[in-house]
């Protein structure tokens, strides 16, 4: 809360010196694990890396404290997997419980972007080393399509069977959320390198009578970015 209080004071403070900053890098999403939109025991591909970018402003609050007000694009991620469509028919790390149901093709994609106002505590000198932290106001989307999904049920203990014909289904979710970001920075002159973690794993609000549409493929991203002040 102290960090958020300092950032709110920035919005109320008189005009102060600032510089524009921008960055370009690579982000890597961390998945929610086996069983969330893919199943490790069956064929799947995960697209967890993406180009990332940042634009914003920065300035000094004191000799050892700086602020950053940045818009951040973390990228687009996705998966393509063959899965049993009934969670009861799957045991994480093992495979099917009893005979496997016919596989269904799960195809998902989504993106994350937002606003990261952070405070940086840093050293001084030719090389500057810093620690960053602050809230992460973000929007994320997730679209999952299954062209050959079908209903199924446990017909006797440990045995599952289809109970209807295959049909296409789609979940299309988006949301605005607040979480946190932390990281480290190294700077020399106007150039820098940031390694930053962004947390963004909350479930999407449900549709069609569901309490939730579940989380996206990811629970957060590590971002590696080269930065430049102007």
Image (cartoon, grey):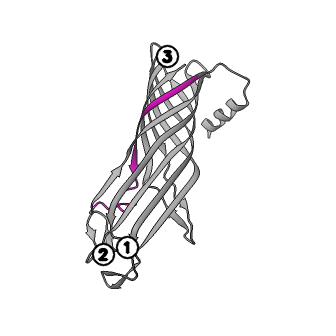
Label 2 with label 1: CB-CB less than 8 Å = yes
Q: Quadrant of residue 105?
A: bottom left
Q: Is residue 228 left or right of residue 82?
A: right
Q: Which of pointers 2 and 1 lies earlier in the amino acid sequence? A: 1
What quarter of the picture does the N terminus occupy? top right
What quarter of the picture does the C terminus occupy? top right
The residue to which callout 3 is attached is: 124
**For the residues marked 2 and 1, what is the alpha-carbon distance in whole angstroms?**
8 Å
**For the residues marked 2 and 3, what is the alpha-carbon distance in whole angstroms?**
62 Å
**SS at circle 1:** loop
Which residue is at the far top? 126
Q: Is residue 39 above or below residue 191?
A: below
Which residue is at the far bottom? 156
**For the residues marked 3 and 1, what is the alpha-carbon distance in whole angstroms?**
57 Å
Q: Residue at x 42, y 55 (%)?
A: 217
Where is residue 195? Give x, y as percent.
Answer: 42, 33
The residue to which callout 2 is attached is: 101
**SS at circle 2:** loop
Circle 3 packing at 10 Å, graded few (<14), some (14-19), many (20+), is few
Q: Which of pointers 3 and 1 lies earlier in the amino acid sequence? A: 1
The residue to which callout 1 is attached is: 86
Magenta segment:
20-40
Circle 2 packing at 10 Å, graded few (<14), some (14-19), many (20+), is some
């Amino acid at each position: 809360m102290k960090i958020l209080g300092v950032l709110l004071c920035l919005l109320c403070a008189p005009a102060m010196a600032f510089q524009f900053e921008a960055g370009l890098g690579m982000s890597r999403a961390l998945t929610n694990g086996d069983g969330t939109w893919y199943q490790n025991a069956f064929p799947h591909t995960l697209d967890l890396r993406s180009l990332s970018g940042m634009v914003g402003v920065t300035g000094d609050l004191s000799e050892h404290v700086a602020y950053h007000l940045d818009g951040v694009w973390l990228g687009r991620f996705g998966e393509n997997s063959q899965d049993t469509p009934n969670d009861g028919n799957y045991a994480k790390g093992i495979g099917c419980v009893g005979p496997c149901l016919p596989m269904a093709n799960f195809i998902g994609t989504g993106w994350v972007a937002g606003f990261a106002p952070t405070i940086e505590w840093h050293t001084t000198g030719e090389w500057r080393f810093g620690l960053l932290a602050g809230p992460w106001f973000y929007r994320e989307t997730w679209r999952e399509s299954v062209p050959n999904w079908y209903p199924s049920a446990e017909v006797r203990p440990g045995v599952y069977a289809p109970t209807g014909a295959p049909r296409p289904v789609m979940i299309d979710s988006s949301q605005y959320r607040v979480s946190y970001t932390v990281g480290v920075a190294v700077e020399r002159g106007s150039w820098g390198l940031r390694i930053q973690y962004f947390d963004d794993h909350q479930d999407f609000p449900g549709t069609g009578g569901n309490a939730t549409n579940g989380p996206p493929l990811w629970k957060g991203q590590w971002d590696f970015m080269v930065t430049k002040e102007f």
